[in-house]
Amino acid sequence: MLEHVGDLLIAPPNLGDFNPRSVLTPGGCPIEWTFSSRPSDVRYMLDIHPRQVPEALKPLVGGLPYCWLNVQKTPQQSTYQLVKPHGWTDPDPLFMEDCVPVLAGFSGPKQATEVHYLYHPGTQGLEKLLEQQHPEWLPAFWNDLRFLTRQPHRRLPHRTPITLIVRDHEVSVHIPSSALFLDERLARQRLGQWFSSEAYTSAMQHTGLIHTTVGWEFSRTGLVRTVGVTLRTWR
């Protein structure tokens, strides 16, 4: 059911399975969908009770009363990842002064497969990181930001930290929607012009959704654009 946003708006799942004090999204909703420019992807993150975690990941839960579960489905397979606070034994692949590791993602019982950082925007630091790994996609990234913000310069929003996610040879940049747009009306207008996804366009016909993040995933195979949304009203 969670693959279809409209179904959830009509018939929400059991509230007892979700964290009533979730910080997954700004408004406290424990569900966030991520639409991708890869049309076959279905992604969502849940802040849920450990009993809902797949058996293979339950040993990682420890004593957490609730945990984040990242679900990604393609026509070929479904993958699940447990996301929890970054520990001192977890990897820190960036090791940058202005990047604070805050979360670690686990696809199995071994070492974390991805690390989430809070990055305090400094254009040169981010550009240097992306130039080292995926310079071929940088022009498209800056062009996207210029279009969304209507600013002519290569400049990141400075009002709030952004999130960097590092996994293998991939770096993702996620900027809060509130840092890019003055309000939800403007976010809907500009993202509707920029982001091409049939699933996203269909979902955003519902006024009960609001935007959370805008993202770019840099990898050797291409640049994937993402948009995160959540429920405007949860309780």
Image (cartoon, rainbow, N blue to C red):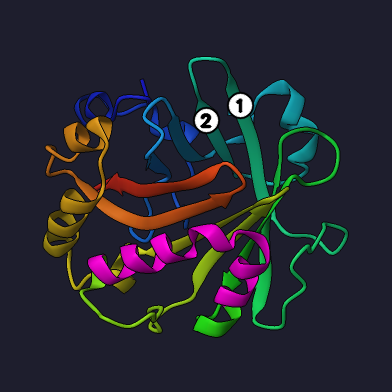
User: Of the residues under marks 2 and 1, which one precedes in the sequence?
Assistant: 2
User: Quarter of the image holding residue 5?
Assistant: top left
Which residue shows up at 23% across the image and 52% down it? 194
Asked whether the viewer can see residue 235, the reply is: no
Residue span colored magenta: 126-147
211 versus 42 height, above or below: below
Q: Which mark is residue 159?
A: none
Query: Mark 2 Cα within 10 Å, few/some/many (few <14, many 20+)?
Result: some
Q: CA distance from mark 2 to mark 1?
A: 5 Å
- State yes or no: residue 139 in magenta: yes
Q: Residue furthest front?
A: 136
Which residue shows up at 41% across the image and 34% down it? 38
Nearest the viewer among 18 and 107 is: 107
The residue pinned by badge 2 equals 72
Q: Position of residue 141 (x, y in %)?
A: 41, 63
Q: Name which residue type carries label 2.
A: Gln
Dominant SS of magenta comes to: helix
Residue 95 appears left or right of 222: right
Q: Quadrant of the N terminus?
A: top left
Q: Position of residue 156 (x, y in %)?
A: 41, 78
- State yes or no: residue 89 in magenta: no
The residue pinned by badge 1 equals 79
Q: Position of residue 150 (x, y in %)?
A: 20, 74
Which residue shows up at 72% across the image and 77% down it? 96
- Residue contact at pointers 2 and 1, CB within 8 angstroms: yes
Residue 144 appears left or right of 115: left
Asked whether the viewer can see residue 54, the reply is: yes
Q: Name which residue type carries label 1.
A: Thr
Query: Mark 1 Cα within 10 Å, few/some/many (few <14, many 20+)?
Result: few
Nearest the viewer among 91 and 12 is: 91
